[in-house]
Image (cartoon, grey):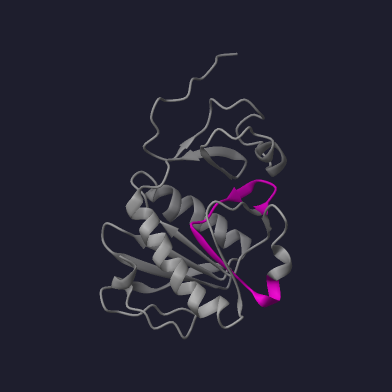
Amino acid sequence: MAIVQRPKEITTTVPADWVPGPPQGSWTYDAYAALPDDGKRYEIAQGVLIMTPAPEPGHQRISREISFCLYEHIMTRKLGEVLYAPVDVVLSEEDTFQPDVLVILNEHLERIQEKLVAGAPDLVVEIISPGSLLNDRVTKKLAYERAGIPEYWLVDPEKKTVEVFVLENGAYTSLGLFQGEQQLQSRIVPEMSVPVAHFF
C-alpha cells in the first residue's frame, strides 16, 4: 500500500488522503473524532475526509461581523443560539462540517450537545476562501440541502456579496445576491436590517 504524504502547504480544499484511517468514502464521525489534534481543519463530505486551509484574517473579520449581527438579532431576543467555527455539525454518518457561522432556533436547541451539533441547524453561513469555492458552492450546498437546513448564506469576500438560499420542496432556491447598501432577505432572521456592506 502506497503512503501518501501530506502536501507541505494546503491552499485549497482537498481530500486528506494522507491521513491514516478508513478508506476514503468510509469515514464516519467516530473515526473523525478519534483523529489526533494536529491543528488542521477537517470535515467529512459523503464519507470523504477533506482538509481546508486555515482561514485568513479577512475571513475571520467577516465571520466576526456576521456573528455579532446574528447575535444581536437572535440571542439578545432569546430566539435561539448563534455558534461559529470550529464546531462540529454532524448531519449524518457520512457528513460532518464546521460551518463558519450557524444559528439554531429555540425549537431545535436539543441538537446542541456537549461536543457537537447533532442534526441540521436552521441557518448556516459559509465564507468563501481562496480555493474553497467549489466546496462551498457545490459540495456543502448539496449536503446542507440533503440535510434539510432551511437557509444557507454564501458569502463572497472578493465580490463583497451574500447569496441567500432557502429550502423549498427539498431544494435550494436563491432569494438573491445582495451587496452594498442592500439588506438581506432572510426567512430565519426576517427583521435584520443591516446593509451587506457592514459585513465587509
**Residue 110, position as x, y percentages in the image:** 74, 67
Q: Is residue 84 above or below residue 168?
A: above
Name the residue furthest top. 1
Q: Is residue 94 above or below residue 64?
A: above
Q: Is residue 88 left or right of residue 134?
A: right
Name the residue furthest bottom. 191
Does residue 188 appear anywhere in the picture? no
Tell whether position 102 is magenta: yes
Q: Is residue 173 left or right of residue 31?
A: left
**Residue 105, position as x, y percentages in the image:** 63, 74
The residue sitting at 65% across, 46% down in the picture is 94
Q: Quadrant of residue 184?
A: bottom left
Q: Is residue 144 above or below residue 192?
A: above
The residue sitting at 69% across, 62% down in the picture is 112
Of 79 and 51, the residue lying toward us:
79
Magenta stretch in the rendered image: 91-108
The residue sitting at 57% across, 27% down in the picture is 19
Tell whether position 40 is magenta: no
In the rendered picture of this protein, how many numbered marks are placed on residues? 0
Image quadrant where one finds the N terminus: top right
Does residue 20 appear anywhere in the picture? yes
The residue sitting at 56% across, 59% down in the picture is 144
**Residue 149, position as x, y percentages in the image:** 58, 66
Image quadrant where one finds the C terminus: bottom left
